[in-house]
Amino acid sequence: MGVASIQAQSTLQLRVDPEAMLYNYVLNTKTDETYGGRVIQILSTTITDLTVPCMAGKGGRQYLGQVATFFKDMMIWQRDSQNLGTFSYSPRNITLRVYAAALQIDDSTANITFPFTMMFKVMEDVTGQAAGNAIDAEINKLKDGVGYSRNQYNDPDMNPPPPVPATDPNGGLRPTGGG
């Protein structure tokens, strides 16, 4: 768990699970069919949506009320000023410029953790880290999809070339003649 912050007309800090944060992205790719097979180039990526699930935990309904008030105020502030908010998660170097989209509160009488989910529309990936993570994920999917695995035929560290034998230009004979 780490601390994320959302900065708008004021700042809200909250604990989030980085593995639970989700962002949608669109890849700009170019695919070419070649004699050797298909070549896929990833030209760029755009982060479109951010979903941040959280829990109020021991802050309970009071903290949940503070979050709801912040989110409502952020949406009104963005509507009136057309300014973007900033979502930051410094442990992973993620900074995104966002518009607040929705706040979903999962509340029930049996619920003691008070989970809620904040959703945002991403306008800019300031650090480029989220886009980099998306590209890494896509490359790993491509790599897994073609069945790539390192072996002695494609990894020089696994099968170094044989040493080059020393050659004698005279074929082992000593030069003759006087000097």
Image: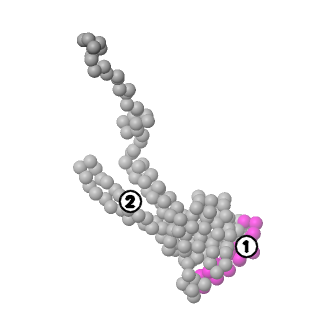
Residue at 50%, 74% in the rendered image: 123
Residue at 37%, 48% in the rendered image: 146
| Residue at mark 1 | 63
For the record, the magenta segment spans 57-76
Residue at 34%, 22% in the rendered image: 166
Q: Is residue 162 left or right of residue 35?
A: right
Q: Main secondary structure of the magenta part?
A: helix
Query: Which image quarter: residue 92?
Result: bottom right
The answer to which of 101 and 122 lies nearer the viewer is: 122
Mark before the other along the chain sequence, 1 or 2 = 2
Q: Amino acid at mark 1?
A: Tyr
Q: Amino acid at mark 2?
A: Ile
**Residue 111 visible in the current orientation:** no
Check residue 60 for magenta coloring.
Answer: yes
| Residue at mark 2 | 42
Q: Is residue 147 left or right of residue 100?
A: left
Check residue 131 for magenta coloring.
Answer: no
